[in-house]
Amino acid sequence: MKAGGIYWQKLGKDIRRDYQLYLLLIPAVLLIAFFHYAPMWGIQIAFRDFKPSLGILDSKWVGLKHFRRFLKSPNMLQLVGNTLTLSVLGVLIAFPLKIFLALVLNELRNPGYKKVVQTVTYAPYFISYTILIAIVNIMFDQNIGVLTHLFQALGANANDCLTSSKAFPWMYVCSGMWQQTGYGAIIFMAALAGVDVSLHEAAMIDGASRLQRIWHINLPGILPTITIMFILTMGNLMSVGHEKALLMQNALNLEASELVSTYVYKIGLQKTQYSLSTAVSLINSAVNVVIMLTTNWIVKKMGQVSAI
Amino acid sequence: MSIVIKKKTAHIASRDDLLVDGAALFISLLAMIIVLYPLIFVISASVSEPMEVVRGNVRLFPKGFTLEGYQRILEYQPIWRGYRNSIFYTLSKVVISLFATLSAAYALSRKNLRGRGFITFYFMLTMFISAGLIPTYLQVQRYGMLNTVWPIILMGTVSMHNLVVVRTYYTSSIPYELSEAAFIDGCSDIKLFLKIILPLAKPVIAVIALNVAVAEWNAYFTPMIYLNDSKLYPLQVHLRNILIMGQTQDFMGSDPEELADMVRLQQLRESMKYGLIIVSTIPLLVVYPFLQRFFAKGVMMGSIKG
């Protein structure tokens, strides 16, 4: 009792002493409260048949009806499959390319030229999705698309890249590579700059060739960075955003371009099935949380290992 | 004997050197061509005779020369209104983000803050769970903020990621002795924050400001769902309607007025398409090389999480 009293006294004193710190926290706390936590009240509509005219609390409680409806629908597997296809393709192709570009840039001797290459390859990162997709549409246009003609010259049929389900994952991942490889390489460049020079000197004395040094010194040197980035990428496996996919969608490629996130948007805001949309996004968030917690846990474990 | 071996390895090393040099040069040139070609094509197409473009005669350099497309863009009011709106949204969002993030991160950097763990958790939880699209939309509706600028400039202004970046900068790059000395001289927290911490935090302020600015300048989705009035649209929403939606058949309205609008947009689109890409992208691409070091720094800062 007495100890408790002292505790509260001390707490009061600390708060009075540091009131200015709490003042500084207010804007951020309020912004988060209004736009992150307050909306969570509405998550319950996933368990109701929400009708805007009735309001949240007066809409009928239906339990897991919407969850069951989505999990049983044939759409579900397709949406999850499409989402996974994009992220797995990204991990398999786009991710190694970033490392590769960093290794190549690291071998350039002229610092001025190196800077130019970096600046140029980094630039598309600043282009918006709308412009990116507009450019993709121009490059793959049936009549004037330069890439369409190029692929045709190489003997491939590229007439319907923009409107085919088969091509969509490649279009999505490759346009992403065009936009993000230079940006993604930066972190590996920095890691390469930290590789011990004396290792290279020792290897040179031993007669190691440059390729051997890249393979046996540079690559292992940045392996911890690669591992962390890889795990972080895996953490986003199910959270492929809707912004870019929505811009690339059309009636003809929908079979491959409808993702969980675009589906949530469409049934929610376009077809106003508020409850179903909320249920789907709730399932997706739950899966995301599990994946993210797992990856965070792995990163932490690894951090301990590398610290030793 | 030993001299011979040395010579031999030196010879091999240099040939191998040249090979790697050549490969690196080739690959880097290829990378630049791949990145630059589409941009050069768009620039060329934007000043070429439209007929030459439609026939597919433009490959690298302009064919014919006309600024008609740019003329059309200059005359097309919605674009310039969108431009103004985008500048306004971007600036507002940067100011609000900085204000909320810098001050909160300062409080979180102070070890004597009671409830620091809980408050950190309060911010961190937003990384893992969010209400989702529809509940957020309905909440904004309840606030009466649909079709106003408020959700555009207030949502997403505070993120755990930015808080951690700034807080880490405060604690790792600004010596604590400085604060201690100020406290002994009777300086209050807010005064210390404004007079000592902020002037020393310029690099991290630049990083946050630039990242928020680029993200907002390029955002189309949030404005698209929260705004109905086209007078409030930022540039990116116009770009989407003209460049992307003009192409697909998805949004043929039944409303005759809307249909007439579509036909007009279609004609405008063809003539303005290329110039529009240039006009909306060039400002950023021109400014960015000079700010590049801040962006690169931002990537680094983001990666060293506390």
Image (tube, coloured by chain):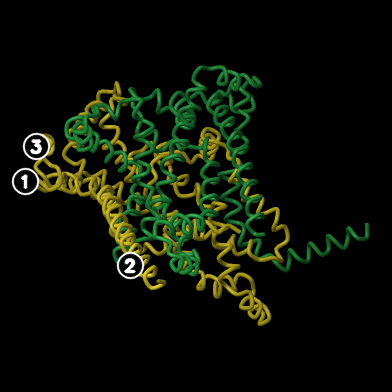
Determine which of the numbered discs, if any, sits on residue B51 in the image.
Answer: 3
Q: Secondary structure at mark 2?
A: helix
User: Residue at the spot x=40%, y=51% of the render?
Assistant: A100
Which tint was used for chain A? green
Which tint was used for chain B? yellow
Asked if residue A273 shows in the view, the reply is yes
Percent x, y of residue B110: 66, 66
Marks 1/2: CA–CA distance: 39 Å
Which residue is denoted by mark 2 in the rendering? A111
Badge 1 sits on which subunit? Answer: B
Q: B195 or A147, which is in the foreground?
A: A147
**Tags 1 and 2 on a common chain:** no
Percent x, y of residue A23: 63, 62
Asked if A103 appears above or below B240 in the picture, the reply is below
Q: Secondary structure at mark 3?
A: helix
Marks 3/2: CA–CA distance: 43 Å
Q: Secondary structure at mark 1?
A: loop
Badge 2 sits on which subunit? Answer: A
Q: Amino acid at mark 1?
A: Gly
- Residue A173 quadrant: top left
- Residue B232 quadrant: top left
Badge 3 sits on which subunit? Answer: B
Asked if residue A53 shows in the view, the reply is no
- Residue B283 quadrant: bottom left
Quarter of the C terminus of chain B within the rendering: bottom right
**Tags 3 and 2 on a common chain:** no
Q: Is residue A275 left or right of residue A90?
A: right
Q: Nearer the viewer, mark 3 or mark 2?
A: 2
Which residue is denoted by mark 1 in the rendering? B64
